[in-house]
Amino acid sequence: MATINLRQVEKKFGSSYAVKPLDLTIKDGEFVTLLGPSGCGKTTTLRMISGLEAVTSGQILFDGQEVTWNHPSQRNIAFVFQFFALYGHLTVRENIAFPLQAEGASRDEIKRRVLEVAQMLRIEHMLDKRPGSLSGGDQQRVALARALVRRPAAFLMDEPLGALDAEFREGMRAEIKRLHISQNATTVYVTHDQVEAMAMSDRIVVMSNAEVQQADTPTEIYHNPANLFTANFIGSPGMNLIAGEYRDGQVQVPGGAIPVDDGWRQVLANGLDGDGKVIVGFRPEAAEVQPTGALAGSVYASDLHGGYSMLHVEIAPAQIIHARVERRVSFAIGDNLRLGIQPDMVRFFHPRTEKAFAKEERRS
Amino acid sequence: MSDTRIVQIFILPTVILLICMNIFPLIYSLFLSFTRFSVISDAPPEWVGLANYQAILTDPRFWNNFAITGRYALVSVALQTIIGFGLAMLLRTKFKGSGILTTLILVPMMLSPIVVAVFWKLIFNPSAGIFNYLLGFTNINTSPEWLGQTDLALWAVVIVDVWMWSPFVMLLALAGLSAIPDYLYEAAAIDRASAWFQFRRITLPQVMPLLLIAVLFRTIEAFKQFDLVMGLTGGGPGDATETVSIRLYKLAFQGQYDTGMSSALAYVILVIIIAVSNLYIRQLNKARG
């Protein structure tokens, strides 16, 4: 298994950036997800790591060895494609055996190892079929088997679940996660699905506009987003973000005033521009319906999600915040209510730089 | 009138034409192949049973015609396949001017075989033609006479046929190659397949169905080869380039106008072409999986 280092790696198409200079270290055995909306450069980054795409400048190192200009075949990696990229004219067995045959492994060895991975992925009963006759989930299993069979130094996966039906997706997600743990393989995984990223990753690299927005553990990304983009992109719905004004230890927002903790006061006083303009952010689950809550609003809509309800509360015309409440709580549209916000879950962002403020004791 | 009746009325002219032009001659010629008959004589067809077929299958000259045709088809189609596929591999990646180049390469295919035969005769001309000159023969007395020497004439026809029809194989091979998705090569690169391994395990099997169709078409055409040979050599010198269809023509429309015998020969050719086609089609189905 391998450590992957990206040093100032960038990709330009013509004069526009597909990936702006990027530094990233993926540790041995780590599961790192590149997450972002389509066109953010995550797939290009993955393809540069694989060697399928040439870098415009920068360096890529595997275990300290420079591989920037190596052909994909010289990098000892496996790549799982979104649309499987199976060899349609070959049987499942031949597909899985392909990388072994390409490096000239012996017949016995090929047979043994194909069977081994086929058993691991529970596809041994379909070895003699053609990929075209299999379901999407099984095709992706075959693709995974083909990737696993060579025991590569790193797995690169480009939205491997993107082409699957919803019902297969969660099962395959668990399977890939288990494979990662059992193989302890360095894995770089690309997805636009933040639920997938949260569930699977050791670390998430959030990308947007060809740039890394934040690279951190799922928990950190969720609770301490580095900027407005991450705050809004992660979570469904994303973080509630309200523009307000910091004055006298609280933030004046439409619908009320949000009190600011002692720990934050100094930070805000130092960091804000003179006008005190600030953006307050909190997750839907940080809001509770309370008779004495800080924010007043009226119910715009309420949807039941099975385990919980999502309340959409209009605090000012066309400004809606989301609150995740117990499923038994129900309100009629137009009801007036007040929302209280757990103080430790409130975050602050600078409206001009869009960056989050960091508390002193928090790691930054 | 019901809809089906209207449909039938619309189809009727075609069906009548088909019966008159195709089905009746087919059956009538099958009947004639068992008779002694000549269209220019007044004598009615005389039933002779399998005598015509027997004569064809025991006459060494007919066997020689088949051997020439077979050799011609084999060499010509093999060369067309190799050259056509090679050209397709070269033109596969687009470059500046590749579109125009592809079109130019296709030109020979669009010409009439008789026109091709006439100007290749000039090209092969030992004293004035450019072919020998390009090969480096400048002395008329020692330079080969491509259409006049028994050992070269068939090769000359092969050269012209290959020149004319390799582009056809190229065209189909290009269609096959462009249908191979890039991701297969990306996957193969990741799987550490060498260029040769990729060619053998991906390119060739993926393009095989279309290549087989090209080979099938060219083989059938080669068996039927008539106009090019007629224009270039007329079957000569001697019978060096006398393919079965030339022989058939001579038998049916020259000298005695032996309609019975030529009908029998036509049927023998038909059976051979169907047999060969079936072999190819079986391969084709196998290649498609």
Image: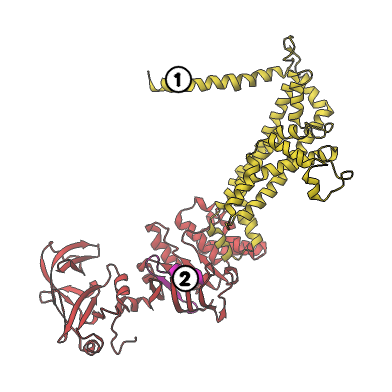
Chain colours: A red, B yellow
Label 1 marks a residue whose chain is B
* Residue at (44% x, 65% y) in the render: A175
Image location (x, y in percent) of residue A234: 32, 71
Can you see residue B209? no
Tell me if A168 is positioned left or right of B126 in this view: left
- Density class for disc 1 (Cα within 10 Å; few <14, some 14-19, many ≥20) is few
Q: Residue furthest front?
A: B128
Disc 2 is attached to a residue of which chain?
A
- Read off the magenta span: A26-48
Q: Which mark is residue B9?
A: 1
Amino acid found under the numbered disc labelled 2 = Lys
Residue B138 counted in the magenta span? no
Disc number for residue A12 = 2
User: Could you tell whether A245 is left or right of A81 in the image?
Assistant: left
Q: Is residue B241 placed above or below A201 in the rendered structure? A: above
Nearer the observer, A60 or A202: A60
Give residue A59's mark.
none
Q: Is residue A125 above or below residue A20?
A: above
Residue A230 % position (x, y)? 32, 74
Q: Quadrant of residue A269?
A: bottom left
Q: Quadrant of residue A279?
A: bottom left
Q: Which quarter of the rendering shows the N terminus of chain B?
A: top left
Residue drawn at (64%, 41%) of the image: B109
- The secondary structure type at the circle numbered 1 is helix
Residue shown at 40%/68% (left/top)? A40
Q: Position of residue A287 (x, y in %)?
A: 20, 74
The three-letter amino acid code for the residue at tag 1 is: Ile
